[in-house]
Structure formats: structure tokens, C-alpha cells
Amino acid sequence: MMACLNGHIQIVELLLKEQVDPNVQNKNGWNAFMLACKNGHTQIVELLLKEHVDPNGHNRKGHTALMAASAEGHYKVAKLLLEWKADPTIKSNEGYTAISLSKDSDIYALIHSYMYKKGNVKLEEDAASVYSFESHRTVSSGYHTASGISSMRTYPSTLTLDSVKEDSEDETYVE
């Protein structure tokens, strides 16, 4: 896991050659693949996908690799995951999708385009915020960043910026 977390591709290659299972999860449900996605290590992500890692696996909170890459702004990883059939409509335990967690307008557009091509006509219902990046670039759902906006309507419920509780526990640490 540490090799994937820190981007050490040669160590990952060696471990895979020794048949180390990349699907093993830490106590929070993160596996090596998800950590590579969260940290933007595109080469490692591609290597693990070729080893048949499930692109739609999730941690204890229901977060997928695509959600992690989207939330951290890793466009190349998000694009690669979509090419390998990562499902952008999967919802976390909190009801978030990869598009709703995206803080990057390019990733938002990438996922939006992918979903449109797949015929997902309920895109706005799947996105947490009804605000678009094109018209409100200061707003991003998931981590609810806003400038001068006190609340925003979201699906499936209404959240105010004051109601968002911060997760003080860093769930990606490796034991």
C-alpha cells in the first residue's frame, strides 16, 4: 500500500511480480489501487487496472477510486478510470457521486460528457449541486466551498454550509 500511496512504481511492479494482492484493504477500506488514484499516480493506476483490480471497489464510506481521483483533482486518473469502466453513478454512503465530489471543472466536464454519452439523462439528480461549474466556479459540492453563498440546494437533500461537518479523521492512513 505504501508503494502505491507514494508513487513508487518499481516497487509496485516488484510486489505484483511476487503476487502480492493489491485488493487488500486497511481498516477504513482503502486498498492500494484507491490510494494510487487518490494521489494521482497514473502509471500505477494503469498497472493495477491491467492486473484486474476492480475500478468500482469502495471503502467503508462507499467512496470509490473515481470519487477519490475526482475529489483530489486528478484529471488523468479520472479519465483512465472512466476508460476502464469506472461507474460515475455509484453513490457513497453519504449520497455523493464522483461528479458531486469533483472540485475541478475539467473533471466535472469529463464526467458530465461521459455520462451524457452513456445516455444518463438524470445527470442533475446525480450531481450533488444544482450549480454548474460554468456559472458558479466558486462553488463545489462535496467539500462545499463557497464565496458569499450561505446555502445551496442539493440532491437528495438540502445542505447549508453550516451543516457540513468536517471529518477530522484522516481515513486514508495505512496501518
Image (cartoon, rainbow, N blue to C red):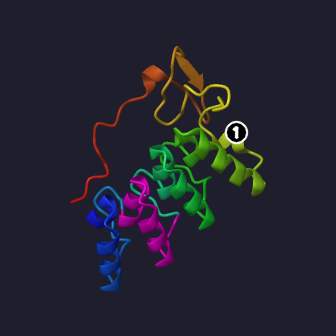
Residue 124 position in % (x across, y down): 70, 39
Residue 145 position in % (x across, y down): 48, 27
70 in relation to 47, above or below: above
Q: Secondary structure at mark 1?
A: helix
Q: Main secondary structure of the magenta part?
A: helix
Q: Quadrant of residue 5?
A: bottom left
Q: Is residue 9 left or right of residue 153?
A: left
Q: Residue furthest left?
A: 175
User: Could you tell me which residue is drawn at 68 percent across and 40 percent down?
Assistant: 125
Q: Residue furthest bottom?
A: 18
Residue 91 showing in the rendered view: yes
> Amino acid type of disc 1?
Glu
Q: Quadrant of the N terminus?
A: bottom left
**Which one is in front, 8 or 146?**
8
Residue 161 position in % (x across, y down): 47, 22
Q: Is residue 124 left or right of residue 79?
A: right
Q: Is residue 33 magenta?
A: yes
Residue 70 position in % (x across, y down): 51, 48
Q: Quadrant of the C terminus?
A: bottom left
103 in relation to 65, above or below: above
48 in relation to 169, above or below: below
User: Could you tell me which residue is drawn at 30 percent across and 79 percent down?
Assistant: 15
Report the residue marked by disc 1: 124
- Which range is magenta? 31-55
Residue 20 showing in the rendered view: no
Q: Is residue 64 left or right of residue 87?
A: left
- Graded by Cα atoms within 10 Å as few (under 14), some (14 to 19) or many (20 or more), the crowding at tag 1 reads some
Q: Is residue 148 magenta?
A: no
User: Could you tell me which residue is drawn at 41 percent across and 60 percent down?
Assistant: 41
User: Could you tell me which residue is drawn at 43 percent across and 28 percent down?
Assistant: 164
Q: How many marks?
A: 1
11 in relation to 82, above or below: below
